[in-house]
Image (cartoon, helix red, strand yellow):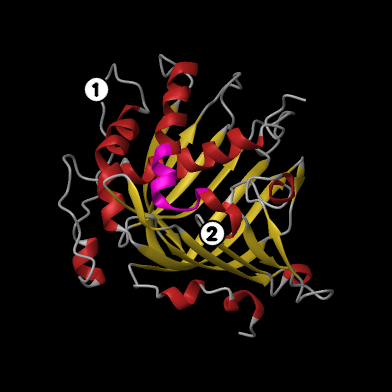
Amino acid sequence: MMSLLSRSTDVRLLFIAVCWGACVAQLQAGPPKPMDYAATREQRTSEYRPTSPKTSVDAHPMEPVLKYARAEQDYLRQAVRDFTCRLIKRERIDGFLQDTQFIDMRLREEVLQQGRVVEPLCIFLQFAGPKKIAGRRVLYIEGQNNGKMLVRNGGKHFDYVVVEIDPEGESAKEETLVPITKSGFAAVLSQMIEVLNRHVEVDPTGANTEVQWIPGAKINKRLCTVIRVLHPTKQSGLEFHVANVFVDSELHVPVRVDFSTWPTRPNQAPPLLAEYTYTDLQLNVNLPDSDFAPKQIRGKR
């Protein structure tokens, strides 16, 4: 079945493209200076100057996204070393809209020097809800454990059982649209450029692509700007009808993204494909190695 939902890889990549493509489209023209990791949050965020995307009359609506994505790829690798947040997500998997999940996340980015990994991507997740998976923990460190993630079951039954799972395998795909290996900024930007180029090829004139800039929205009482990407007409190769990206006006990173497919009957609201909201986001907090130690999976917290 070649439906939208059957192509889970494309869905995951499209989520990445919309979310981070919209983020970099706001950054000031010209490559900003590398960020001082020891700076305060106020100093760090002052490097950003969000502006409305601008294109010429004849330009493709996605042109500024690609332009800034290429310009900011190296910058964001330097600017964000790690972060913590609570991720609230809901996804439609195999046609079924799943329960909302609440996940506390710690992530340390991969660091490359002369093409060599000197610090691997490190991710730790702890699930706070729903009840059936509360207490689940996931640890992934790139290049360790034979590429597998350690997963503590959580929930009410066999909660202390720890298993190894391939993050790109079928078991993982049954649980999430976005693999844990694609959670860092570096991976996000690489996939974003690839996917956006493909979308421009599908709609080369931009006749079926609209981008709107909507200031003044709020998420969790924080001021945001919404970037809305709309494909009015269903078209082969375009995987969503509408996507909304909320970018925090202070932190200047996406704090919510939702995307939906085309309605199948008149007056129907666009069916939700996925929504992701990032709360309590803290950037560059200097996470220690101990936050990604295997004991975090098995020990009590």
Q: Give the overall secondary structure of the magenta segment.
A: helix
Q: Is residue 221 visible?
A: no
Q: How many marks?
A: 2
Q: Is residue 256 visible?
A: yes
How crowded pointer 1 is (Cα within 10 Å; few <14, some 14-19, many 20+) is rated as few
Specify the segment rendered in magenta: 182-190
Q: Is residue 85 above or below residue 9?
A: below
How crowded pointer 2 is (Cα within 10 Å; few <14, some 14-19, many 20+) is rated as few
Q: Is residue 264 above or below residue 142?
A: above
Instruction: Write the residue at 57% across / 42% down.
Output: 259
Instruction: Write the residue at 15% across / 52% down.
Output: 33
Nearer to us in this view, 212 or 72: 72
Position of residue 195 measured from the top left corner of the image (x, y, whole percent):
47, 30
Q: Amino acid at mark 1?
A: Ser
Position of residue 271 measured from the top left corner of the image (x, y, whole percent):
68, 40
Which residue is under mark 1? 56
Q: Kindly report which numbered mark, 1 or 2, lies closer to the viewer in this rendering.
A: 2
Which residue is under mark 2? 144
User: Callout 1: helix, strand or loop?
Assistant: loop
Left or right relative to 22: residue 154? right
Q: Is residue 79 above or below residue 263?
A: below
